[in-house]
Image: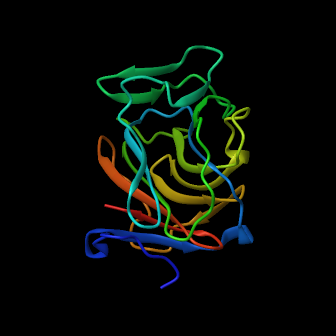
Amino acid sequence: ADYEVKGGAYSNWTVIYNGTGGNLTTSPMRVAITDYNGTGFVSELAVYDANGDLEFQDTFKGKQAWVEIDSNNSIDLLDNTVKLNAVSAAWNYGLISKNSYSRVKGRYIYGKYTTGASVSPSLNAMVGWAANTDAVASYTNINHALYFNSGALIVYENSGSYAANGPATTYAINTTYEFRITLKPIGAVYEIK
């Protein structure tokens, strides 16, 4: 296989995209959460190395591990979740990890994302691997992310959208999804459950 996750029971995960979009080999990268009028929230993010060992985990009891790009104080921590409130139509609010991570086959982000109460047009959020900068929260810095886009579940790689090529191409409102984005030498594998 072109990717492996130690202890990863793939029978429980749905691969929605096994991509090499943009032929990305970017390294190092950071973890990012950004949104464009989103209504959902993230309750956990973690990074695991290629051996399945935990490198970073946050359940959002504080923002100490993150650089916050938020001129309007729109990012809320509540009940161990982080929510980027629907305040911007410019993709300019987000959290970016202070730590950076090299591209290693098998390194992955694990997280939980709960969708909002609506999938009305322009309620969007992205979470995943981003460029190694903490200055910009925009989707233009996203390398590998899941894109919750007004009811459609899309993969975003290297500033380009890719329709999910697996069975999960939409998402439901008020639903928590676990996700995993596993790095390959070129590209990444995107999974949900």
Q: Is residue 176 left or right of residue 127?
A: left
Number of on-image labels: 0
Q: Quadrant of residue 37?
A: top right
Q: Position of residue 48 (x, y in %)?
A: 43, 56
Q: Position of residue 12 (x, y in %)?
A: 26, 69
Residue at horizontal 71 percent and vertical 60 percent from the top? 26
Residue at horizontal 41 percent and vertical 36 percent from the top? 40
Residue at horizontal 38 percent and vertical 63 percent from the top? 52
- The answer to whether any part of residue 115 appears in the image is no
Which of 4 and 16 lies nearest the eye of the viewer? 4
Residue at horizontal 51 percent and vertical 31 percent from the top? 65
Q: Position of residue 27 (x, y in %)?
A: 70, 58
Q: Is residue 54 left or right of residue 31?
A: left
Q: Quadrant of residue 160?
A: bottom right
* 148 up-or-down from 189: above or below: above
- Picture colour scheme: rainbow
The quadrant in which the C terminus is found is: bottom left
Looking at this rendering, what residue extends furthest in the top direction?
A: 72
* 114 up-or-down from 53: above or below: above
* 72 up-or-down from 102: above or below: above
- The answer to whether any part of residue 136 appears in the image is yes
Which of 91 and 105 lies nearest the eye of the viewer? 105
